Amino acid sequence: MPDVKVTIHNKDRKIGAMVKALAFEVGGPKSVTGTSKEFLEENGFYIFHFSSQEYAAEFMEALAQYLPGLLATTK
């Protein structure tokens, strides 16, 4: 199962919510497991879990298209 780590600028919960929505849209509910506001506050990033490399790539493309790199970046 491919994972994608996304760093959220300034641990901003609203940006995190947008990133989570993109992940959910691409990978469904299992992709956002563990992405709580407490995790973001502690770590400054989320880790999303996708069932295939294709979904992970689709998510990264959507992230690049809809959110500028300043706000959220993959590692």
Image (cartoon, grey):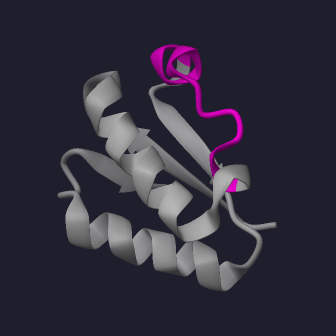
Q: Measuring 61% from the left and 45% from the top, which residue is drawn there?
A: 47
Q: Is residue 15 above or below residue 11?
A: below
Name the magenta segment's main secondary structure: helix
Q: Measuring 73% from the left and 52% from the top, which residue is drawn there?
A: 30
Q: Measuring 64% from the left and 60% from the top, which residue is drawn there?
A: 28
Magenta stretch holds residue 35:
yes
User: Horizontal placement of 17 versus 27: left or right?
Assistant: left
Question: Quarter-wise, where is residue 11 in the image?
Answer: top left
Q: Is residue 45 above or below residue 55?
A: above
Which part of the image, by quadrant, shows the N terminus? bottom right
Magenta stretch holds residue 13:
no
Percent position (x, y) of residue 61? 38, 77
Q: Nearer the viewer, residue 14 or 42?
A: 14
User: Horizontal placement of 72 versus 52: left or right?
Assistant: left
Magenta residues span 31-42
Q: How many marks?
A: 0
In this orientation, does residue 8 appear?
Answer: no
User: Horizontal placement of 66 versus 24: left or right?
Assistant: left
Q: Nearer the viewer, residue 19 or 5?
A: 19
User: Horizontal placement of 38 versus 50: left or right?
Assistant: left
Percent position (x, y) of residue 14? 28, 30
Percent position (x, y) of residue 45? 49, 35
Q: Measuring 68% from the left and 80% from the top, which residue is drawn there?
A: 53
Question: Quarter-wise, where is residue 44 in the image?
Answer: top left
Can you name the residue that lies furthest to the bottom here? 54
In this orientation, does residue 65 appear?
Answer: yes
Q: Is residue 18 above or below residue 53?
A: above
